Image (spheres, grey):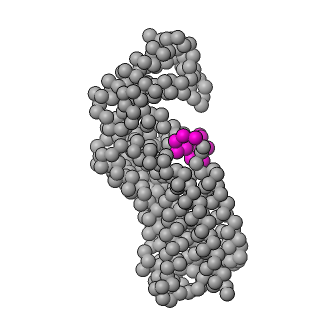
């Protein structure tokens, strides 16, 4: 993906950031991408639904191969939707900056700290378990869909739905990547979006492999419960750091 | 057998206690943690017996009460399944 980042920058026509031409100067963009991927991967709704899907599938005595296949289709649904959302965000930024780049900057830098605060105070509900911010009827609907999912198409659609439902929070990392890479040559957008989506789904791939190899759902759930404070704080802090970092790069470019 | 009624979560509808329904949910929890099928049914049968004896003195309980009592007994026989059974509605 670094090669894509580098070649995309070489061919970028117009950017708010400096059009770097040496490999050393690619690192800021790679760091932004890495940070955004980390924040997005910390969001837990897709892992929650994967856990539920696996739990019900194992409860129905599905073979490990069938479980793996369902999980792969689910992850494909999540990854495809994230890639499309990233493409949409980049296109939006490109069209917004072509008319008024100040508006795009102001919107980005007001929304990101707000989402970082929401991650800390709203994302996880208080109390036991790993209940998320979702309204209860929506959470029950997703739980029921996970329980009723039997075919690959249903698993794919469930993954796509999950990625869209997560959007109020996923907007922050998507916006940072779109903002930082707005000057990127359009021919590399698809590669960047696919790379981003695959990197974000790495935890899901790990969980799917872990469960399909015969491990218990309860161990994943226990880990998630233990790590929820850590995930919450690190993702919020990373969002703040990313925002400051992008601001510094912006100011550097202006100066 | 018990004549207790169960008030369902969300809808607040009331229905007669169905031991088979409880049995199936406990079997599903046990199978989810990869217990053997026979072990799952044995465990569920024991837990349902405990719940029925607890219900003998009750006329109306909530489904949350049943889940709490069942999970405390399930914890004795299969702690991993009890954890998943308790946390089923706390995952997402």
Coordinates of residue A204 in the picture (x, y in percent): 42, 55
Residue at x 48%, y 16% (from the top left corner): B54
Is A57 displayed left or right of A166 in the figure? left
- Residue A150 occupies which quadrant of the picture? top left
Identify whether A93 is placed above or below A52: below
Q: Who's the residue at 45% across and 16% down the image?
A: B52
Rendered location of residue A83, percent (x, y): 49, 65
The part of the image, by quadrant, that contains residue A218 is top left
Q: Which percent across, then down, holds residue A181?
A: 55, 76
- What residue is at 64 percent from the left and 75 percent from the top? A247
Q: Is residue B61 left or right of residue A199?
A: right
Residue A134 belongs to the span the image colors magenta: yes
Residue extent of the magenta highlight: A127-139
- Residue A153 in view: no
Can you tell which quarter of the image residue B77 is in? top left
User: How many badges with numbers are in the image?
Assistant: 0
The answer to whether B56 appears left or right of A16 in the picture is left
Left or right of B30, for residue A105: right
- For the question of whether residue B55 can be seen, the reply is yes
* Residue A124 in the image, given as x and y percentages of width and height: 58, 48
Depth check: give the residue in front, A108 or A165.
A108
Q: In the rendered view, tell whether residue B2 sits above or below residue A86.
A: above
Q: Is residue A177 above or below residue B36?
A: below
Chief SS of the magenta region: loop
In this rendering, is residue A85 above or below A219?
below
Q: Magenta includes A7?
A: no
Of the 4 image quadrants, the one containing the C terminus of chain A is bottom right
Q: Say which quadrant the N terminus of chain A sits in.
A: bottom left
Q: Residue furthest bottom?
A: A21
Q: Nearer the viewer, residue A79 or A227?
A: A227
Q: Residue at x 37, y 25 (%)?
A: B44
Q: Nearer the viewer, residue A179 or A70?
A: A179
């Amino acid at each position: 993906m670094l090669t894509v980042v580098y070649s995309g920058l070489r061919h970028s026509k117009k950017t708010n950031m400096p059009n770097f031409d040496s490999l050393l100067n690619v690192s800021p963009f790679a760091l932004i991408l890495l940070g955004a991927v980390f924040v997005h991967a910390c969001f837990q709704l897709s892992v929650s639904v994967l856990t539920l899907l696996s739990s019900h599938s194992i409860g129905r005595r599905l073979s490990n191969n069938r479980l793996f296949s369902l999980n792969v289709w689910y992850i494909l649904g999540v990854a495809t939707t994230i890639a499309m959302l990233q493409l949409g965000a980049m296109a939006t930024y490109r069209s917004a900056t072509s008319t008024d780049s100040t508006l795009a900057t102001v919107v980005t830098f007001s929304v990101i700290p707000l989402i970082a605060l929401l991650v800390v105070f709203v994302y996880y509900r208080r109390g036991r378990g790993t209940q998320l911010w979702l309204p209860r009827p929506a959470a029950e609907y997703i739980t029921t869909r996970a329980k009723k999912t039997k075919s690959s198409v249903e698993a794919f659609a469930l993954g796509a739905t999950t990625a869209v439902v997560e959007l109020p929070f996923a907007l922050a990392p998507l916006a940072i990547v779109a903002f930082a890479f707005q000057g990127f040559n359009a021919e590399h957008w698809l590669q960047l979006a696919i790379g981003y989506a695959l990197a974000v789904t790495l935890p899901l791939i790990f969980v799917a492999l872990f469960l399909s190899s015969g491990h218990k759902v309860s161990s994943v759930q226990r880990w998630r419960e233990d790590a929820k404070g850590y995930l919450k704080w690190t993702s919020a802090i990373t969002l703040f750091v990313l925002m400051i970092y992008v601001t510094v790069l912006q100011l550097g470019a202006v100066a | 057998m018990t004549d207790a009624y169960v008030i369902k979560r969300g809808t607040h509808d009331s229905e007669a206690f169905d031991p088979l329904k409880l049995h199936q949910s406990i079997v599903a929890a046990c199978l989810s943690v990869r217990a053997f099928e026979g072990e799952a049914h044995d465990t569920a049968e024991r837990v349902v017996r405990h719940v029925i004896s607890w219900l003998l003195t009750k006329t109306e309980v909530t489904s949350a009460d049943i889940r709490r009592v069942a999970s405390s007994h399930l914890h004795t026989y299969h702690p991993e399944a009890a954890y998943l059974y308790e946390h089923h509605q706390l995952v997402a």
